[in-house]
Amino acid sequence: MSGMVDSQLAEESLMPFVLLLVGIYSVTASAEQQWFSRHSEGWFWYEQIAEPETDENEANDQTKRHQPHTTAWIRNNIGLYLDKAIELPSRENVSNYLYLDRLIKEKAERFARVGKQVIEGDPLLDENVRRPISPAAAKISDDMVQHARQQVLQQIAKIAGLVFYYQGRCRLCQLQAQTLMALSQHYSFKLISFSTDGELIPDLPDSRIDREPSPTLNIQTYPALFLMKPPDEIIQLRQGVISYIDLHNRIVEAAHEAQWISEQDYKSTLIVRDNWNDASANAIPLAGRKLKKHHSIGEIDHEQSKSALVH
């Protein structure tokens, strides 16, 4: 009897170890099964284990973002100091904000001073190259552009004419007719006019009646003006009244869009010189680089603000 008891006690004491062994075996078997199912991956020393990527420049940027008085730090913290100075306007809080504000102005003044030097030394940035700043020089430049525009308009008038749709009872159409006749006489544009209500404007040369204009013209209001190059090229200039000067510019722009004039001739008519092109854009030192956003919040105290201004 005592032997049976001892045997039972022995079994009970060994049971936890048996369960542990069963668990270990099941885990081991499961691991072996997973390994066999992944045998095509090869031995572990052939496996390429991805290492965490580190960007030295990005790490340096992160360090700089948390350094007080940098531009990124100021951008993220200036609002906090302003809020604190307004909510709790103690001498220290207000002084901290004012010192930080003074630091910003100092940085801006230095940037503006260097920026002025860079602009004046680079023709791609200098507005004086695009159009003279001096009033006397600007007047000469404008006169040169006006002369070039007149020559280009005379060139266009040799290959294209104006087509004018109007209504004889329309006073705006009558006003536009005066503008077109002046332009036609000055640059020798051929002017063909069509009345859609049956009433002709007496002063208009070569005026005809056309009560149903072609739907392809898409005329929605009168007067309606088109530029036509025989035999079948026609461009809408404007529906509604257009001034004499604006009409000059619109004709040149339309002829340029239709490639009836060269790029050089078109640029000669521009008041502001266009000196940028693809080569200029490619010359930008930072072309193709992405600017990273800064997101950080730091702290600044009264003494740090003062030392920043000193240095």
Image (tube, rainbow, N blue to C red):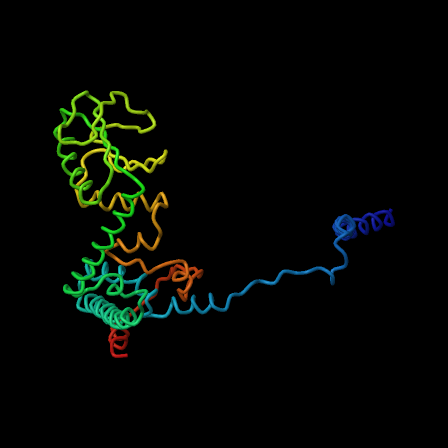
> Which quarter of the figure has residue 128?
bottom left
Does residue 122 lie above or below 198 as drawn?
Answer: below
Give the camera-side residue of 27 and 295: 295
Which percent across, then down, holds residue 232? 36, 33
Position of the C terminus by quadrant? bottom left
Which percent across, then down, holds residue 249? 24, 46
> Which quarter of the figure has residue 158?
top left
Determine the residue positioned at 33% across, 70% down: 68
Horizontally, is 284 left or right of 300 in the view? right
> Which quarter of the figure has residue 200?
top left
Determine the residue positioned at 27% across, 35% down: 226
Horizontally, is 196 left or right of 229 in the view? left
Determine the residue positioned at 41% across, 65% down: 283
Count of all numbered marks drawn on residues in the image: 0
Q: Residue furthest bottom?
A: 311
Determine the residue positioned at 47% across, 68% down: 57
Which percent across, then down, holds residue 127? 25, 63
Does residue 219 lie above or below 275 as drawn?
Answer: above
Give the camera-side residue of 44 and 17: 44
Horizontally, is 41 left or right of 191 in the view? right
Does residue 219 lie above or below 116 as drawn?
Answer: above
